[in-house]
Image: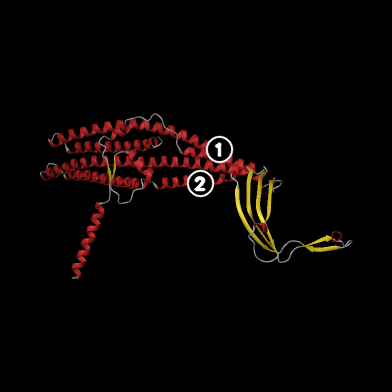
Amino acid sequence: MTNRCLIVLLFFNLQLVVFAQQNVDSIQIDNLDMLWKMALENNSSQKIYNLKSQQAKVDYNSARAYLLPQISGSFSGQDNTKLATTPVPGELLGQPNTTQYLQFGKQFVYNTGVTISKSLFDWQSKAQAKIAKQNIALNTAQQLASEQNLKTQIAQSYFTLLVAKKAIDISEKDLKLSDSILLINKQKFQQGLVDAIAVNQAAVNSNNIKLSIAQSKELYKNALVSIKILAGMSENTPINLKAIDDIESLYNTESKTVEQDKNVLVYQQNIEIQNGHYKMAKAAFLPKISINSYWGYQQFRDNFGMDFKSDSWKDNRYIALNMNVPIFTGFANNNRLKSNRIQTEIVKEQYNAALEQSKINDKSLQETILNYYTITSTSKKSFDLYGNNLQLNHQKFTEGIIGVDVYFKAFDDYLKSENTYLNNLSTLLYNQAIVISRK
């Protein structure tokens, strides 16, 4: 009975696993734009940048709080256990030439009221608010650079996937041809028409093609894993990639212009933020002016307790104008200003260096793409020609017109041209991914 129950439970669990696997939605990828859109929505780094953008806006609103008045309410109760003693001339009390020591006030004092303060001139807070606003622009620039880098990585993985798929398709056709030659050589060896070297060479060719297929499959798998990670997919998410029969269509347009690298924008925003820090350091030498107003009531009592009648509370109101002028700060403000001036020069130099380096790299990238467009197109033509030669030599070999050594030489030339073409194609698309990701 126990065994039957275990079998039923095992069958039930297997059914649940199969059902769960069947209900995993597959993702259809028709083109690179779809993959980019998915990645920008689901990539973890992009989600973090969106949260940082919200945080920067909140910090900016917080920094602008100095523009609004600050209002606070207060209540305090004080027990004067020993009232302060004040010396008073005796003449005031009809006792000339004496000093009388008197105590003024009540033992219990209660204060309640509302304080309103407003900053009139605070250049440091104003500079801090501008820095907070620039932080929003900096986060936007960083996010644009991150999006560009993400799109580049996805495009490179996507193109690697397509090239690996094409390499697998070509190699599988090559393997069929190689296996047929191996079979023919085995038959001829049995008939005494060829030696064992020819059979071994044919076997080596088949093994090399199998090795190439395995390497391409590993490349395909790694590219697929990279796409899943970058696009924020789960491990078990199946992907249906739309086949591209004519992979040459991916590079049939020459790249005439290369847009600026968005990573340079980050350096530019760093200059703006550093200018804000420099202005804030200069503002430390300026006075701060603020106004305070208090509106409240006081109650004085000889005994503990509190009376809530209106005539028991006395008005207490005032308005004060405050001005704080820095006179000497131990040269801290001077040194802070010098440090910020040097830091400003540093970020400017970093921006200029990054801009020049970007221009050099972009020009080199454009030349590389144009060169490899020609290289890839030429190697494709050579690959096609070697393929035609291989077919012709295959016919001659099966008819006995040429020997096996001549055919193996043609087959070897074909495999080399195939490898050259796929490598050139991969390099071209790898660099092209950098250009198209900036648009």
Q: Is residue 86 visible?
A: yes
Residue at the image point whose x is 50% and y is 44% from the top:
57
Q: Nearer the viewer, residue 159 or 367?
A: 159
Residue linked to disc 2: 58
Q: Look at label 1 and name its amino acid.
A: Lys
Q: Residue at horizontal 24%, vertical 58%? A: 16
Q: Helix, strand, or loop for circle 2?
A: helix
Residue 181 located left or right of residue 381: left
**Label 1: few (<14), some (14–19) or many (≥20) C-alpha neighbours in 10 Å:** some
Measuring from the top left, give residue 78's x and y in whole percent. Answer: 67, 62
Tell me the SS state at disc 1. Answer: helix
Q: Which residue is mark 1?
A: 348
Quadrant for the C terminus, please: top left
Give percent across and percent down for residue 28: 28, 43
Pick the front one: 302 or 335? 302
Q: Is residue 222 left or right of residue 54?
A: left
Left/right placement of residue 324 relative to residue 190 reads right
